[in-house]
Amino acid sequence: MNLRDVISEFESSPAISVDEQFVKERSQILSKVELDLEERRRKEASGEEAIKRFSDAKILLEQIEKEYTTKTKEIKRRKDSEIKRLSGKVDGFREELHHITQKRTGILGVISKKARAQKEAETTERLNSAQRELTLAVQYFTAEQERLREEYKRRKPPVIEQIRDR
């Protein structure tokens, strides 16, 4: 039962006489109450909407942070794996080159000078190639990490601003 129903029931009583002044004042009061209630509902809805926007922004910020952390760990894992693989390759070529330079040459030596020089040149080239590959891998992962950091720095501030502006 609403206020209008209660007043109508009150007015319908034979013991109460309603004049024009009462009807006018009643209409003004009811209109004011309805306007006040509507304003209160709008404010509550606006407040609920602001709370939802705030909550959504916090969830988005947490998601951005989580994605950044996950991707950073993944890049680090891949970088460490690739550097370990390439470092092992470089170390292997260095070891091979060391063995080649330690072999004796000559009439009674195991290998001829020409063969040794050829093998040393080939191994040196493979070592240099592996070192370039290692350098490029480090540069690639550094650039990938920087791209990720730039994306993070681009995405985070607007969300933080939404949280502040709530």
Image (cartoon, rainbow, N blue to C red):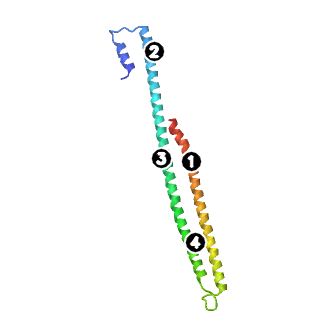
- Horizontal side of 90 relative to 49 (left or right) equals right
Among all residues in the image, which is located at the extreme bottom?
108
| Placement of 90 over or under 42, stated as above or below | below
Residue 86: percent from left, percent from top = 56, 69
Secondary structure type for disc 3: helix
Q: Label 1 to label 2, Cα distance in Å?
A: 56 Å
Q: Is residue 29 above or below residue 109?
A: above
Which of the two discs, 1 and 2, sits closer to the camera?
A: 1
What amino acid is at disc 2? Gln
Judging by the rendered image, the residue that carries numbered circle 3 is: 62
Marks counted in the figure total: 4
Q: Name the residue under label 4.
A: 90
Few, some or many residues within 10 Å of mark 2 (<14, 14–19, 20+):
few
According to the picture, the residue beneath numbered tag 1 turns out to be 153
Whichever of callouts 1 and 4 sits on the residue coming sooner in the sequence is 4
Asked whether the beta carbons under mark 4 and mark 2 sit within 8 Å of each other, the answer is no
Mark nearest the camera among 3 and 4 is 4
Residue 117 occupies quadrant: bottom right
